[in-house]
Image (cartoon, rainbow, N blue to C red):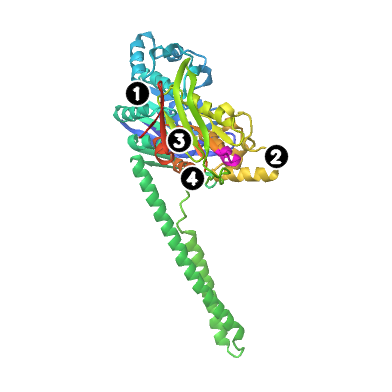
């Protein structure tokens, strides 16, 4: 249906290649997951397939593609800010394929996504992150495209909508190409994997295309890496023994050369011949080594860790009792919540119910305690970021050389290149901004951290490592998340926020 032939994409600013000689055919009913680390070109490739003009300001490409006469529908990763001051209905109708005759279908989709019918009169900026994604999906479905291109469609969606989206992707009889950090969704939906990698300190790109499901791909990859590592180690171990034996012979012959009598020219000639043979053997060894299997370089080997927490004793750090706050001019009551020093909790609930508002409220309450150092990671990273600031400077309190070295080392552990460390924050991908925030939490050694959708935009390959880091964190975590693996692996208590209040639940 769609053909890409010998497609190569590279960035203008640093001439870094994102995709090289990429060949791909999209067939009917393919559910294609594009995976890879942050900044590897996943969104760029998706934009190129949709409309190559979207990447021309920062990338160049060569190669050919044929999209036929198919109508493509594209869900962008983040809504363009120009739409934020539009009413929902005006945003929906700002599309040549949608008109007032489709309002009946629009109302049905609002019900399907559990959105209020009157939401169409609200400004886009008044919606929660999950509600915005739902409205984007509704607009996409109303346009009725032949092929769906989805960039992080799971961002901020509640669990019920995530499960609906999984079923939708599986059951729709149309090709879908999507990018997602949600491992559960990947496991349940993808039947083709496109893996984009940057190796050798991002000086080379590599891509893998497999027509299998996500979990099979991960299992196959692990086995391949283990087998490659085993063979590479064995080759080097055997070679080391052979070289050690050769060195022993070499030393013996050299000793014989030093002690041989001048009266034995025949013996000296034999030893000289022996030395020549040993040198030839050395050359053969060097040739063999050049043909050794390389250790398979992977990207997911990121490193991150928290220092030991300064709070040593378990104490109450937050107590909310009958706290009231407003969400969309509606008061939420019955908010009872107690959190101790070492607890890890998550708040779930439908989109728009007020989870982010509650998390911000908790943050302000904890800040009132002078003995507690509290850090906050927002859902929208741009809230607390200067887009023009250089990335590494976002993490530094001063320009002290020791601090700068520490920051650069930590950024290197998360696979930031020197160019990316010096780049403006506006030039980084959503996942790279998320990593910056995580590093900020690490560097500042907080007693408590509040996280609003901490795994959104992060690679599904690095998310298991991030989860392990958060699980081992010695302080308290208060979070909002719909990432089912994060909920299963990291948190100890799950609270659900509804219009009636907050209650603890068992999943």
Tell me the tag on residue 146.
1
Residue at mark 1 to residue at mark 3: CA–CA distance: 42 Å
Element carrying mark 4: helix
Residue 472 bears which disc, if any? 4
Disc 3, SS: strand
Distance Cα–Cα, label 1 vs label 4: 45 Å
Q: In the visual, does 388 lie left or right of 450? A: right
Given this view, does label 2 or label 1 mark the residue nearer the observer?
Answer: 2
Question: Which-is-in-front pick, marks 3 and 2?
Answer: 3
Closer to the camera, 114 or 504? Answer: 504
The tag earlier along the polypeptide, 1 or 3, is: 1
Element assignment for label 2: loop
Q: Are marks 3 and 2 in contact (CB under 8 Å)?
A: no
Q: Secondary structure at mark 1?
A: loop
Q: Which residues are magenta?
A: 438-447
Residue 345, which numbered label? 3
Q: How far apart, in angstroms, are the residues tagged by discs 2 and 4? A: 31 Å
Q: Is residue 1 visible?
A: no
In the rendered image, which quarter is residue 184 located in? Answer: top left
């Amino acid at each position: 249906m769609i053909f890409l032939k010998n497609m190569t994409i590279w960035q203008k600013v640093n001439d870094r290649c994102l995709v090289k000689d990429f060949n791909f055919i999209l067939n009917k009913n393919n559910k294609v997951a594009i995976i890879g680390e942050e900044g590897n070109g996943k969104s760029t490739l998706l934009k190129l397939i949709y409309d190559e003009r979207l990447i021309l300001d920062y990338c160049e490409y060569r190669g050919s593609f044929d999209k036929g006469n198919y109508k493509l529908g594209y869900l962008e990763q983040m809504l363009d800010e120009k739409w934020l001051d539009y009413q929902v209905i005006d945003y929906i109708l700002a599309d040549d394929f949608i008109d007032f005759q489709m309002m009946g279908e629009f109302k049905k989709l609002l019900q399907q996504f559990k959105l209020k019918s009157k939401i169409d009169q609200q400004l886009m900026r008044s919606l929660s992150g999950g509600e915005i994604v739902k409205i984007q999906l509704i607009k996409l479905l109303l346009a009725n495209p032949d092929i769906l291109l989805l960039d992080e469609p799971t961002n901020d969606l509640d669990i019920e909508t995530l499960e609906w989206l999984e079923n939708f992707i599986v059951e729709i009889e149309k090709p879908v190409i999507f990018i997602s950090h949600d491992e559960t969704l990947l496991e349940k939906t993808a039947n083709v994997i496109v893996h984009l990698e940057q190796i050798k300190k991002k000086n080379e790109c590599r891509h893998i295309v497999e027509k299998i499901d996500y979990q099979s791909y991960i299992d196959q990859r692990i086995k391949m890496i283990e087998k490659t590592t085993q063979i590479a180690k064995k080759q080097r171990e055997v070679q080391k023994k052979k070289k050690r034996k050769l060195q022993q012979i070499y030393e013996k012959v050299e000793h014989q050369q030093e002690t041989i009598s001048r009266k034995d020219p025949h013996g000296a000639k034999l030893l000289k011949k022996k030395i020549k043979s040993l040198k030839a053997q050395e050359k053969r060894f060097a040739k063999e080594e050049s043909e050794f299997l390389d250790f398979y370089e992977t990207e997911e080997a990121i490193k991150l860790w928290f220092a030991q927490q300064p709070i040593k004793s378990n104490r109450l750090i937050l107590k909310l009792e009958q706290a009231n706050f407003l969400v969309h001019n509606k008061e939420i009551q019955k908010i009872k919540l107690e959190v101790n020093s070492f607890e890890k909790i998550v708040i779930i609930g439908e989109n728009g119910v007020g989870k982010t508002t509650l998390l911000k409220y908790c943050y302000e309450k904890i800040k009132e305690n002078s003995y507690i150092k509290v850090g906050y990671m927002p859902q929208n990273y741009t809230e607390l970021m200067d887009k023009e600031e250089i990335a590494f400077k976002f993490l530094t309190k001063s320009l002290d050389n020791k601090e700068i070295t520490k920051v650069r080392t930590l950024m290197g552990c998360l696979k930031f290149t020197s160019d990316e460390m010096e780049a403006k924050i506006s030039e980084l991908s959503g996942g790279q901004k998320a990593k910056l925030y995580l590093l900020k939490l690490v560097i500042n050694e907080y007693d408590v951290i509040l996280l609003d959708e901490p795994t959104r935009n992060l690679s599904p390959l690095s998310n298991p490592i991030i989860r392990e880091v958060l699980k081992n964190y010695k302080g308290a975590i208060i979070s909002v998340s719909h990432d089912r693996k994060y909920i299963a692996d990291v948190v100890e208590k799950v609270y659900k926020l509804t219009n009636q209040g907050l209650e603890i639940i068992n999943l």
